[in-house]
Image (cartoon, rainbow, N blue to C red):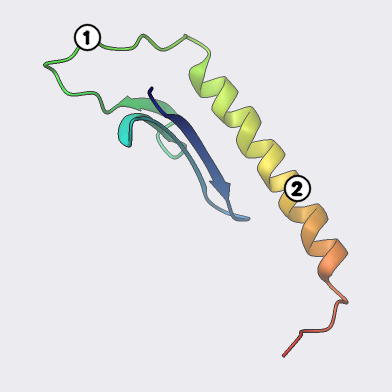
Amino acid sequence: IHTDMQMIGCSETEGAFDNSLDEEDVFVVDFIAERVVDKQPSFVDHVSLGKDTFQVAMGNLIACRRNLNITQKALKDQPLES
């Protein structure tokens, strides 16, 4: 059994999109340089990435920021619990 995991995170100014297989990075997305960075070691058969991988990651970043905005607005007037 293998574990394939995607992590998507964002703030108002930054974003992260990482993909791993069995806790080893397969690729990460560099949103500043607008590219996908292959993290697979040279001695393995590489998992091929689709040509639209960056665009998919960008779509996820946009959705993350939209969800962040909605959550911030919804929680804006909520009192802090002690």
Q: Is residue 67 left or right of residue 55?
A: right
Dots 2, 1 in contact, CB < 8 A: no
Instruction: Please give the name of the residue rendered at 75% of the width and 47% of the height, measured from the top-left corner.
Output: 67
Q: Percent position (x, y) of residue 14? A: 53, 51
Q: From what the image shows, is residue 19 above or below residue 52?
A: below
In the picture, which quadrant includes the N terminus? top left
In the picture, which quadrant includes the C terminus? bottom right
Q: At label 2, which amino acid type do we have?
A: Asn
Exactly how many numbered labels are in the figure?
2
Q: Percent position (x, y) of residue 73? A: 84, 63
Instruction: Please give the name of the residue rendered at 77% of the width and 54% of the height, measured from the top-left corner.
Output: 69
Q: At label 1, which amino acid type do we have?
A: Asp
Q: Determine the secondary structure under disc 1.
A: loop
Mark 1 residue crowding within 10 angstroms, few (<14) / some (14–19) / many (20+):
few
**Image mark for residue 67:** 2
Q: Percent position (x, y) of residue 4? A: 44, 27
Instruction: Decide which of 51, 82 is in the foreground and name it.
Output: 82
